[in-house]
Structures are given as structure tokens and as C-alpha cells.
Image (cartoon, rainbow, N blue to C red):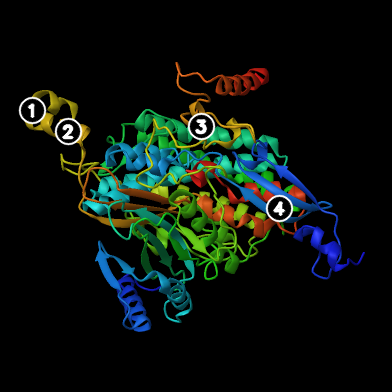
């Protein structure tokens, strides 16, 4: 039906096609309590039949003021709030924050801590990707996948628990090194996982990669090309799936990543299936990196030998006056990095996470801003799903692997 | 990929390019811990960003981050910070503009969404948390805080907790159109109603109705 100018003014923009035809659209609300939005994401979708004409994400439901909180804690204390941003990859957040603070302080970390950090960050990447794999497949109806993926993740959480005593919010990587030495049995436990993981990964491939139902739901769904990814600030597997071989671990190596031999998997179409494949291949590479890290793990200290940054051991506090003073100063006041600012980027499981830390010379970060990868990736979501079917929105959300904890911070 | 040694050279070339472009305008180049910061006047930010994105040997195609810092006692009060990255040449630079004259509640900065669409949400976040307005932004709304929030939490003068705010800042607690009693002015973040001992009948009825609704749901 051709519309008169006066009639058109009464309609919403999305209800008129470029050539002046009226479309009967419906605006619906998805989330924030929808199970497949992976947290508290709300989408306002304008539909024409089953096709999404317009999508507007509404975020902020999980805003907890983490940046504000960090400004009011010492550098030492602010570490624990970084765990809570991307709660599926706390060790990656710890690593990014620690590297930023170390750069402000200008300290060099011993080789053992660097290699151990790589091993832990890659185990964390595996754990994060396993949660993504399970939930993404569950969204698309493959329920058993969820159980398998969580079975393997449980082994990884056991490893983190062995190291730090905590399964999730470990805070194990800290400015200056690690909280404690790698425990006895760490090597054996990780090797046990690495021995079974390739077989399990093959099992996942059998279940999903060549599964016609899965391919139908994911291939050519919600594609995004490389130019749009870069323009909208998408990074990580979303960017690599569209064919850009960009990985911060290779481009700006940190924590001795330059010593490791690994490949960057890239996709071609940038659709849901490619994002799936990129992450699956990344898991293979991560397991490989962990193996290399275990093989080359040096002996020596796991933290810097500076009592101004690292608390002295308990036995020293009990027997040594100097150690007692350092302990007291560190826990009451903390350390004071010189005035300045740094931006430290690392490759988290979701993409580029950046820590912008500003020091005014006091013992608290004057400003800590986090460039969250999910924030950029979510911004690209409307571009992916406009023109797609409503049922594919769920597949698209799963494929960008958002964690609302870091989107909202 | 190019050698990592190139990064400082590229940053130096960036600074030279910006100097060249701005001529007499006052710019400041700071290097700290191997990272280069270029501080420039706010009116030049959009043309400079455009130029850096399109410069053939630099190509800053990725806006990694955009945020702000509040230096409460300084004038101008705010730094707006841009972290630029080139995925083609691996060049990295930080741009900074300073805004916020004395007594200016909502300083303005021209938007860079025209250069990188990624700036859209970042600028909304800066507006939401700092109150810096980005002119010509396509969608200048709050993004993290509720739409009816009345202040900007990341400002240094915004207290962390235990506050009495000047007006009802959580829209849902006062029914639309009803007169607001002075007791309600003193509500804290999560507790509807006023301070014990200063019960105003009208505020009390509002409080009860709010709490009553909650009870029914459970």
C-alpha cells in the first residue's frame, strides 16, 4: 500500500520501507530475564513477520560500579574486583590488571611467573570456551553438549582450586607474580587433563561440526564482514571469524607469549558457524600452549623479590621485624606507583581486554577503566541480526559469547 | 607482520603528522613507559582522528577505547582519552583532549562516531558516568545507569556510599504527579522511605504501598 506523506509521518521509521511501502511491524521485548541472553541483556526487537528489522540492545542491568570501587581501593585490593567482571575468565582479567600495575611500577617479573601465567591464562581460555560451547549448543537445542562441556570444565576448575583454593574468583595472578607457588601435583593434574582433552575435542567435533542440524542453524547466519567488525570495535574470535588474523598475543606479546609456538585460526564468512569453528580450533591451540608451558616451566621464584610489592611469607612475619613492618605497610597502605598512566591490552577469551590505569602517585588507582571485549562485540550485534530471523537472534547472541558482568562492569 | 621495533617510530611519525596538521595550535606530546600521548585542543579532535584513520602509512582503523578521567581540582577538569590502534601497521597512540571550564556542568566534545562507529557506546558511557556531552552524537542517552538517574557516578565528587541525594533519583519510588515530601528527599540508594523518627504521613503511605507491592510478589 502506497502511503501519503501525512500518513507516513504518523508511523515509526521502521514501519516504512525506503520506497514508501508500509510494513506492519511489531516491537517486542527480549530479556533481561530470557535464558538465552546469557545474563541480563535486554533487546528491543522490531519485527516484520519473523524478520528482525531493528534491534536495540539495552544494557546496564548488571552495572555494579566496579571502576568506581577500584578507585577507592589500594592497588592490592582492587585486584579482586577484576575477577568479577568477566566471571567466566577471572584469571585473564587478573593478568591484564597485574600487567598494567607492573608496568606502572616498572618491575620485571621472574620467568617462572611469566610462564605459569601463560599456562593459567590458556587453561582459563579453555574453561571459558567450554562454557560458551555448552551454552551455545544448548541454545540451539543440543542439550547433551552442555553436560559434556561442563564435565571438562570441572576438571579445569579443580586445577584452579588446587592452585588458589577457589574455583572461580581465584585472584591467583597478582601484581608482582602469583599469590603462591604452583602447588605440587599441578603439573600432573594439568597433564592428566591434556591427555584426555584432544579426544574429547574430537568428540565435540563429531557431535556438532558435521551435524546437519547444527550446520543448518549456524551456517550463513548473522554474518559480519571484517570492515564492520573493525569499525564497530569487535575483537577476538568474532573478528577472527571474519578473516582478520589479529591476535594480541602475536601482535603485542606479553608475559613471554613470543616464546610459544601457536597458530591463529581464522574464518572466512564471519557467520555463527565460523565463530564456532574459530573457537574450537583455538581450544586446540590453547591446549598446545599449555603443554609447551609445562615443558618449559623454569625453576625459581614465582614473584618479584621486593617486599614493598609482595607480602613477606608468614614465617618471616612471625620472626623478623623488617618483615612485620613490610607486612603492616603493605596491608594498611599498599604501594605507590609513580604518577603516570598505562594502557595494557591482552587477549582474553572474548577478545581484546584493555586496562587503562592512571596513577596520581598515591596508593589507590586514580582511575581504572576497563575496555571490555564483550562491550565492543555486543555493539556489533544489531548489525549482525538486522535482516535475520527471530530464531537466529539466539544463535547470534550465543556466537559472540558475551558476559554481561564485563559489559556493564 | 612488521617488526615490533617499528612501534616507537610509528608513534613518532604520528606525533609529527599531528604537529604538521595543527600548525600553531598548542599540542603536547608525552611519552611514558613506551606509550605516546598526544594532548590537543578539543576543537581539533575530529579532523585529527579522521586524518589518522586515513593516513596511508598509519591507518588507525580501530578505536580500542574511549574514556574520561576526572581531575577534580584542575581546570579544565576532565581528560577525554582515546586509545587508537592500527590493525594493519600495529601503530598505537593515545589522544587526549581537556574540557570542563570552571562552573561548566556539562562540557561538550564533538563526537567521533563519524570516524569510528565503535565510539557510539563508549561516548554514551562517558556521558552517563561523567556528564560530558558529545555534540552531534546520534543517540546521546544514558547507557549503564537508569534513564532517570540524576547524577554522574564516576565524577570524583560523587560519593561512594551513604549519601543523601538532593532529589528522588530513583524514579520508580515516587508515583508520577504526586507531590514529593521532604522526607523522601533523604532516601538512600536502596531503602525507600525516609529516616526513622521523621515520618511524614504522605511519605509513609508511599513507602507502604511500595513495600506492600513487593510483599505480594513473594
Which quarter of the figure is the N terminus of chain A placed in? bottom right
* 4 and 2 marks in contact (CB < 8 Å): no
* 1 and 2 marks in contact (CB < 8 Å): yes
Q: CA distance from mark 1 to mark 4?
A: 63 Å
Q: Is residue A198 above or below residue B197?
A: below
Mark earlier in primary sequence (3, 1)? 3
Q: Residue at horizontal 35%, vertical 33%?
A: A163
Q: Chain of mark 3?
A: A
Q: Residue at horizontal 49%, vertical 26%?
A: B183
* Quadrant of the image occupied by residue A304: top left
The picture places residue A377, in percent across and down from the top left corner, at 56, 54
Q: Chain of mark 4?
A: A
Q: CA distance from mark 3 to mark 1?
A: 41 Å
Under circle 2, the secondary element is: loop
Mark earlier in primary sequence (1, 2)? 2
Instruction: Report the residue marked by disc 2.
Output: A312
Under circle 3, the secondary element is: helix
Instruction: Report the residue marked by disc 3.
Output: A154
Q: Chain of mark 1?
A: A
Instruction: Report the residue marked by disc 1.
Output: A320
Instruction: Tell me, yes or no, if residue A184 can be seen here.
Output: yes
Instruction: Report the residue marked by disc 4.
Output: A218
Amino acid at each position: 500500500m502506497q502511503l501519503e506523506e501525512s500518513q507516513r509521518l504518523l508511523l515509526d521509521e521502521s514501519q516504512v520501507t525506503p520506497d514508501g511501502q508500509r510494513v506492519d511491524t511489531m516491537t517486542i521485548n527480549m530479556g533481561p530475564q530470557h535464558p538465552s541472553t546469557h545474563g541480563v541483556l535486554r533487546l528491543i526487537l522490531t519485527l516484520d513477520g519473523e524478520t528482525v528489522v531493528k534491534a536495540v540492545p539495552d544494557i546496564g542491568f548488571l552495572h555494579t560500579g566496579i571502576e568506581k570501587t577500584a578507585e577507592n581501593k589500594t592497588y592490592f585490593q582492587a585486584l579482586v574486583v577484576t575477577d568479577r567482571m568477566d566471571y567466566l575468565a577471572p584469571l585473564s582479567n587478573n593478568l591484564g590488571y597485574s600487567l598494567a600495575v607492573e608496568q606502572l611500577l616498572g618491575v620485571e617479573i621472574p620467568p617462572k611467573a611469566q610462564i605459569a601465567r601463560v599456562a593459567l591464562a590458556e587453561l582459563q581460555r579453555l574453561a571459558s570456551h567450554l562454557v560458551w560451547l555448552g551454552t551455545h549448543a544448548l541454545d540451539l537445542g543440543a542439550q547433551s553438549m552442555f553436560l559434556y562441556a561442563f564435565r571438562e570444565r570441572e576438571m579445569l576448575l579443580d586445577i584452579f582450586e588446587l592452585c588458589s583454593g577457589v574455583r572461580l574468583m581465584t585472584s591467583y595472578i597478582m601484581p608482582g607474580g602469583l599469590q603462591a607457588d604452583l602447588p605440587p601435583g599441578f603439573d600432573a593434574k594439568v597433564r592428566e587433563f591434556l591427555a584426555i582433552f584432544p579426544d574429547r575435542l574430537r568428540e565435540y567435533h563429531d557431535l556438532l561440526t558435521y551435524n546437519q542440524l547444527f550446520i543448518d542453524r549456524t551456517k550463513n547466519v548473522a554474518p559480519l564482514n571484517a570492515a564492520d567488525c573493525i569499525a564497530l570495535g569487535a575483537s577476538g574470535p568474532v573478528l577472527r571469524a571474519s578473516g582478520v588474523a589479529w591476535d594480541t598475543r602475536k601482535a603485542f606479546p606479553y608475559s613471554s607469549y613470543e616464546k610459544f609456538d601457536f597458530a591463529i585460526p581464522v574464518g572466512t564468512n564471519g557467520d555463527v558457524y565460523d565463530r564456532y569453528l574459530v573457537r574450537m580450533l583455538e581450544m586446540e591451540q590453547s591446549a598446545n600452549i599449555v603443554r609447551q608451558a609445562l615443558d618449559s616451566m623454569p625453576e625459581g621464584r614465582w614473584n618479584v623479590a621486593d617486599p614493598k610489592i609482595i607480602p613477606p611469607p608468614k614465617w618471616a612475619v612471625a620472626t623478623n621485624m623488617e618483615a612485620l613492618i613490610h607486612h603492616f605497610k603493605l596491608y594498611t597502605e599498599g604501594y605507590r606507583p609513580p604518577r603516570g598512566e598505562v594502557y595494557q591490552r591482552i587477549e582474553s577469551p572474548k577478545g581484546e581486554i584493555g586496562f587503562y590505569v592512571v596513577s596520581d602517585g598515591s596508593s589507590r588507582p586514580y582511575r581504572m577503566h576497563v575496555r571490555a571485549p564483550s562491550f565492543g562485540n555486543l555493539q556489533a550485534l544489531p548489525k549482525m541480526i538486522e535482516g535475520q530471523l527471530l530464531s537466529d537472534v539466539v544463535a547470534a547472541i550465543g556466537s559472540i559469547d558475551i558476559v554481561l558482568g564485563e559489559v556493564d562492569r | 607482520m612488521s617488526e615490533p621495533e617499528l612501534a616507537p617510530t610509528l608513534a613518532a611519525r604520528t606525533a609529527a603528522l599531528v604537529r604538521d596538521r595543527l600548525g600553531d595550535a598548542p599540542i603536547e606530546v608525552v611519552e611514558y613507559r613506551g606509550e605516546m600521548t598526544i594532548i590537543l585542543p578539543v576543537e581539533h579532535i575530529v579532523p585529527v582522528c579522521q586524518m589518522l584513520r586515513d593516513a596511508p602509512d598509519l591507518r588507525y582503523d580501530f578505536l580500542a577505547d574511549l574514556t574520561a578521567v576526572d581531575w577534580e581540582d584542575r581546570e579544565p577538569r576532565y581528560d577525554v582519552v582515546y586509545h587508537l590502534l592500527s590493525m594493519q601497521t600495529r601503530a598505537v597512540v593515545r589522544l587526549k583532549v581537556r574540557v570542563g571550564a570552571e562552573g561548566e556542568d556539562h562540557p561538550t566534545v564533538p563526537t567521533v562516531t563519524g570516524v569510528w562507529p565503535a565510539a557510539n557506546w563508549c561516548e554514551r558511557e562517558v556521558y552517563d558516568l561523567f556528564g560530558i556531552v558529545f555534540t552531534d552524537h546520534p543517540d546521546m542517552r544514558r547507557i549503564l545507569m537508569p534513564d532517570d538517574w540524576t547524577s554522574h557516578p564516576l565524577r570524583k565528587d560523587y560519593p561512594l556510599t551513604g549519601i543523601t541525594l538532593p532529589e528522588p533519583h530513583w524514579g520508580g519510588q515516587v508515583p508520577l504527579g504526586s507531590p514529593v515530601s521532604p522526607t523522601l528527599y533523604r532516601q538512600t540508594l536502596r531503602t525507600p522511605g525516609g529516616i526513622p523518627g521523621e515520618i511524614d504521613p504522605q511519605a509513609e503511605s508511599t513507602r507502604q504501598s511500595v513495600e506492600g507491592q513487593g510483599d505480594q510478589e513473594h
